[in-house]
Image: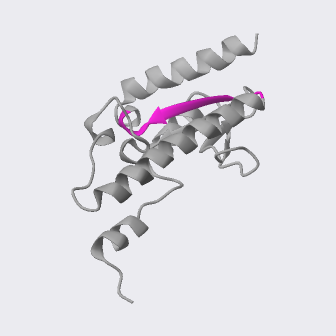
Amino acid sequence: MERSVKSAQMARVRTQNTAPEMTVRRALFGLGLRFRLHRRDLPGRPDIVLPRFKAAIFVHGCYWHGCTMCDRGVRRPKTNTAFWSAKLEENRRRDQRNQADLRALGWHPAVIWECEARTPGTLRTALDRILSGVADAGK
């Protein structure tokens, strides 16, 4: 059975250690923060976990998770549209469930979008927002 070109492309999409995730990890490390990666015992298996703050950070790809801040989140393939719409909608629902489950366990879930990680200033703003939120929650 021969795989289609699209199937082969999709199979190469990484789920861990992506370029945006690595950028966020370098930024956090540069701020002096230490973290754990991809904890399997937490809902959604967060990309980055800051145990000291009970913070779980997901680094989401704009296309796969439906970012509303850039055009990549609203793009849809022109073929097999029903399949892709359903798949991407289920990704968003799963993200919401995982975040709700984390909150129920006392964790502080946060999302950094791929488009935020592209620009150092925007990434710093996103990290400041997350870190101030978990620091305030810890008081």
Quarter where residue 79 is shown: bottom left
Q: Position of residue 48 (x, y in %)?
A: 62, 41
The residue at the far bottom in this view is 1
Residue at (30, 69) in percent of width and height:
6
Residue at (52, 53) in percent of width and height:
17
Residue nearer the viewer, 127 or 133: 133
Q: Is 24 covered by the magenta stretch?
A: no
Q: Which residues make up the magenta segment?
A: 106-115
Quarter where residue 113 is shown: top left
Q: Answer yes or no: is residue 34 visible.
A: no
Q: How many marks do you count on the picture?
A: 0
Q: Position of residue 133 (x, y in %)?
A: 61, 16
Residue nearer the viewer, 26 or 38: 38
Locate the N terminus and report the quarter of the image it occupies. Answer: bottom left
Quarter where residue 121 is shown: top left
Q: Position of residue 33 (x, y in %)?
A: 65, 31
Residue 129 shown left or right of residue 100 in the figure: left
Residue 29 shown left or right of residue 90 in the figure: right
Locate the C terminus and report the quarter of the image it occupies. Answer: top right
Q: Answer yes or no: is residue 110 visible.
A: yes
Q: Judge whether 104 appears above or below 80 on screen.
A: above
Image color mode: one colour
Residue 133 shown left or right of residue 19 in the figure: right
In terms of secondary structure, what is the magenta stretch mainly?
A: strand
Residue at (77, 27) in percent of width and height:
106
Q: Is 113 covered by the magenta stretch?
A: yes
Q: Judge whether 7 appears above or below 66 on screen.
A: below
The residue at the far front in this view is 82
Q: Position of residue 53 (x, y in %)?
A: 72, 25
Residue nearer the viewer, 12 or 79: 79
Residue 112 shown left or right of residue 73 in the figure: right
